């Protein structure tokens, strides 16, 4: 028999209580189910984005990152970035997800040298954004309330005026 720990994801301190032990057989079955679930999740677009986010957050915890003066991503920052990731419309081009020196997490859409949008999340429920679209710039801060911000949708429409997914749908009709 093994012992499992229950976690409260809002508590960065870790386990909140011990759960009853499970049998080895049930533990193996649970492990198989979890492996299958992770395989399915990680093969999806959102799963790949989650893997990118985990890599960016893990990078900030490395000795090399911190030796170069980088700050580790805070638990709250990771939570905000994960919540933002879950709101991303999947018909958008895939953003690059990276850590900033101050521990914030950036989602960046790059369509060319003068067509880029960055959304930066930190520990507070807000996001900062900056866009370069040809000769125009846009920047600001928006509250992040669990929905993909309309301003980002509008800017992405300008950055990607003819997205491949729109062309593909038009061809199929």
Image: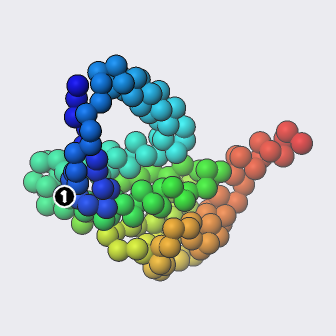
Q: Which residue bears the numbered disc 1?
A: 13
Point out the residue furthest to the front here: 20
Above or below 110: residue 145: below
Residue 106 in view here: no
Residue 58 in view here: yes
User: Measured from the top left, where is residue 32 in percent x and y?
Assistant: 41, 23
The C terminus is located in which quarter?
top right
Residue in view at x 29 percent, y 21 percent: 24
Above or below 148: residue 35: above
Above or below 160: residue 122: below
User: Measured from the top left, where is residue 1 in percent x and y?
Assistant: 23, 25
Camera-nearest residue between 63 and 51: 51
Please give left or right for residue 138 compared with residue 1 in the image: right
User: Measured from the top left, where is residue 50 in percent x and y?
Assistant: 43, 46
Residue in view at x 67 percent, y 64 percent: 157
Above or below 169: residue 89: below
Colouring style:
rainbow
Please give left or right for residue 106 compared with residue 149 in the image: left
Callout 1: SS: loop
Point out the residue furthest to the top here: 25
Q: Quadrant of residue 89?
A: bottom right
Camera-nearest residue between 124 and 7: 7
């Amino acid at each position: 028999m093994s012992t499992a720990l229950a976690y409260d994801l809002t508590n960065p301190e870790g386990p909140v209580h011990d759960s009853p032990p499970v049998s080895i057989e049930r533990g193996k079955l649970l492990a198989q189910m979890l492996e299958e679930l992770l395989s399915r999740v990680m093969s999806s677009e959102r799963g790949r984005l989650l893997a990118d986010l985990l890599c960016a957050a893990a990078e900030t915890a490395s000795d090399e990152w911190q030796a170069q003066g980088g700050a580790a991503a805070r638990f709250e920052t990771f939570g905000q970035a994960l919540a933002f990731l879950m709101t991303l419309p999947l018909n958008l081009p895939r953003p690059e997800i990276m850590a900033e020196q101050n521990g914030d997490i950036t989602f960046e859409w790059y369509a060319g040298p003068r067509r880029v949008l960055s959304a930066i999340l930190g520990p507070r429920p807000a996001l900062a954004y900056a866009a370069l679209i040809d000769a125009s710039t846009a920047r600001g801060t928006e509250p992040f309330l669990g929905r993909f911000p309309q301003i980002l949708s509008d800017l992405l429409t300008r950055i990607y005026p003819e997205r491949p997914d729109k062309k593909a749908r038009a061809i199929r009709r």
